[in-house]
Image (cartoon, rainbow, N blue to C red):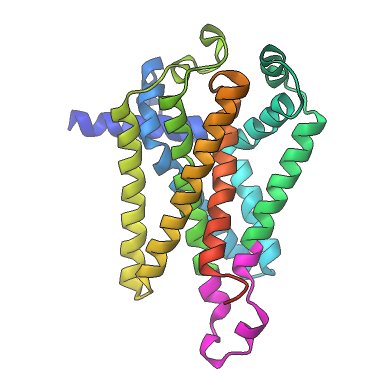
Amino acid sequence: MKALLHEIRLLLIALQFLTRVPVPAWVGFEPLWLQSCLRHFPLVGALVGLSTALVTAAAAAWWPPVVAVVLGMAFSVWLTGGFHEDGWADTCDGLGGSVSRDKALLIMKDSRLGSYGALGLILLLMLKAVVLTSLATPLIHELGSAQTSHVHEVLLAWTMMAIVWCHAASRLVPVWLIRCLPYAGDADHAKAKPLAMQISTGNALAATLALGLVAGLMWLWLYQAGWPTPTLVRAMSWVLAAMVLCGLWCGLWFRRRLGGFTGDTLGASQQLSEVAGLLAWLALVHPVAS
């Protein structure tokens, strides 16, 4: 029971760290718990994704898919405080130009938004909105088929699952980057010092198992609903493959330019992985040639 209570405490700390959601006072806090709570990042991502998916579905009952998607994204940004988006923008500012490592780290610490950051943020959010809208919008031949009279509902359901899975899986990428890369900045002056230290392989594997739990719950829900679970398994596999490639690319990029990771680059890796995963999901579940 003590071990279970501690894991619940770590889950709530991860929730507090990644979102605006307040946690009860009994949770408490110790600096080393911040490092241990990394294994619950995929679960928090799944909760953020589920909340975003529900807001998107509710909005879709009143407005077209593009409006519902943007409202869902706006809710996600509000719920997380733009935590990862801010990291992506700062990474674009620091690594967008041909500057030295020290200069890049200095730029990334600046709270002001530069041209590279603004452009990167606009393009990333726009791409995410377009992908989700394409996933939720029926193609012309789908609308003309008698067998797909509920095509809007079906596509919305697959869009909701994409949101949940990509939010959950993309939170695993920063965990493995922390495991595999050294901290690039000054660890003594890091905003979250425990996250500036490499985590154990066991902690990273625990986070991977947490993502496996999310996958199992999604599969079970689809199975109980009588939907095609093989399609879900393939879609989740494609997303993971895309995120692995994206994570490897990010790791090489950050090591080459900075010598390791920073808090901002972790947020950037999550955002890039989420978009890569959504693109993979769209290519399988709702391709143009279908």
Judge left or right: residue 113 versus residue 133: right
Q: Position of residue 175 (x, y in %)?
A: 43, 32
**Residue range of the region highlighted in magenta in the rendering:** 133-155
Q: Magenta segment: does it hold 141?
A: yes
Q: Magenta segment: does it hold 227?
A: no
Judge left or right: residue 280 versus residue 127: left
Residue 168 against residue 230 in the figure, above or below: above
Q: Quadrant of residue 121?
A: top right
Say which quadrant the C terminus sits in. Answer: bottom right
Identify the residue at horizontal 35%, vertical 69% (top origin).
Answer: 229
- Residue that extends furthest to the right in the rendered view of this protein: 115
Say which quadrant the N terminus sits in. Answer: top left
Q: Position of residue 103 (x, y in %)?
A: 72, 14
Q: Quadrant of residue 230?
A: bottom left
Identify the residue at horizontal 66%, vertical 70% (top origin).
Answer: 62
Q: Position of residue 84 (x, y in %)?
A: 59, 35
Is residue 81 at all visible to an observer of this figure?
no
Q: Position of residue 269 (x, y in %)?
A: 56, 36
Is residue 183 at all visible to an observer of this figure?
yes
Examine the residues drawn in magenta and state their main secondary structure.
helix
